[in-house]
Amino acid sequence: MPNEEKHRVKPPRLWLNKLADIGLYLLPQVLGLALLVLIWSIIAEKNSALPTPTATYHEALKVFADPFYQNGPNDQGIGWNIYASLKRVALGFGLAAVIGIPLGFMIGRFRFLAGMFNPIISLLKPVSPLAWLPIGLLVFKAAHPAAIWSIFICSIWPMIINTSIGVQRVPQDYLNVARVLDLSEWKIFTSILFPSVLPYMLTGVRLAIGTAWLVIVAAEMLTGGVGIGFWVWDEWNNLNVPHIIIAIVVIGLVGLVLEQILVAAARAFTYDSN
């Protein structure tokens, strides 16, 4: 019997520690969500116009039972509306990245360009995103490109500013060594600037994607068509409050997923200067 006790398998402490860590990580989040649902329930009890969490949950089951149905151009499932919004965000955000990141490098690298563009950025950056929408409608004569324009013009500023700040904060000693070694501008960019600026650049990209998602929802509410913002406005016109709440949750979840994708990409991205 003593020998059997010695060879008895004991649960490894490593797994127990991991389970404890997971529990400590999830518990505050679960409690926070439970508190939100509790507050929602209390308000719904006091105001009959607001649906309860249970009623909204049952309505959500119906909405997501067939998210990709199509009964015409203005009657489509929530899945198609999310897809349309994401497509607009991808176009506007992609154009902003293609233009904003290189421009940020040039502004941070060359003082003359910084002096030329800084007043423009300072003037245009505080403008409300929706203030750009009428300009887009005037120029493009259509809602779809106008919405993409609004995303582009509001997403580009975080990329330009954060990238240029990153370039300006590269230690001057590195650039002095590059000058002594007579490195080409391309070699300076690939070996010195890009590795140093990458964290700033990714921060700008994260800020820009959040701005882009906010803007598209507001723009679609004003321009109509297909999109999650239009879906919210259409459900409001139909006085379908449970669908509005479902859309709010979906908008938040999609925004969270987009940000987490960029966070994961930033953590996984490694740059080897060798």
Image (cartoon, grey):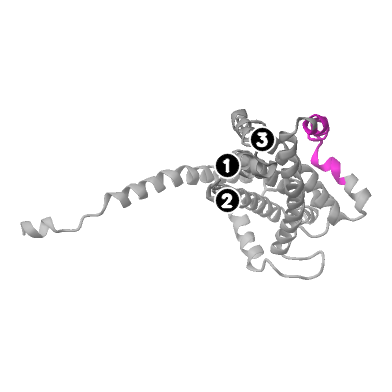
Is residue 100 on the magenta stretch? no
Nearer to me, 182 or 151: 182
Q: Which residues are magenta?
A: 113-133
**Whole-percent x and y of residue 41?**
58, 46
**Whole-percent x and y of residue 71?**
78, 71
**Whole-percent x and y of residue 69?**
72, 70
Q: Secondary structure at mark 1?
A: helix
Label 2 belongs to which residue? 265
The kind of residue tagged 3 is Val
The kind of residue tagged 2 is Ala
Nearer to me, 143 or 221: 143
**Whole-percent x and y of residue 225?**
83, 59
Res 47 → quadrant? top right
Question: In this orientation, does residue 203 appear?
Answer: no
Q: Which mark is residue 167?
A: 3
Label 1 belongs to which residue? 39
Is residue 129 on the magenta stretch? yes
What residue is shown at x 73% (from left), y 44% (from top)? Answer: 102
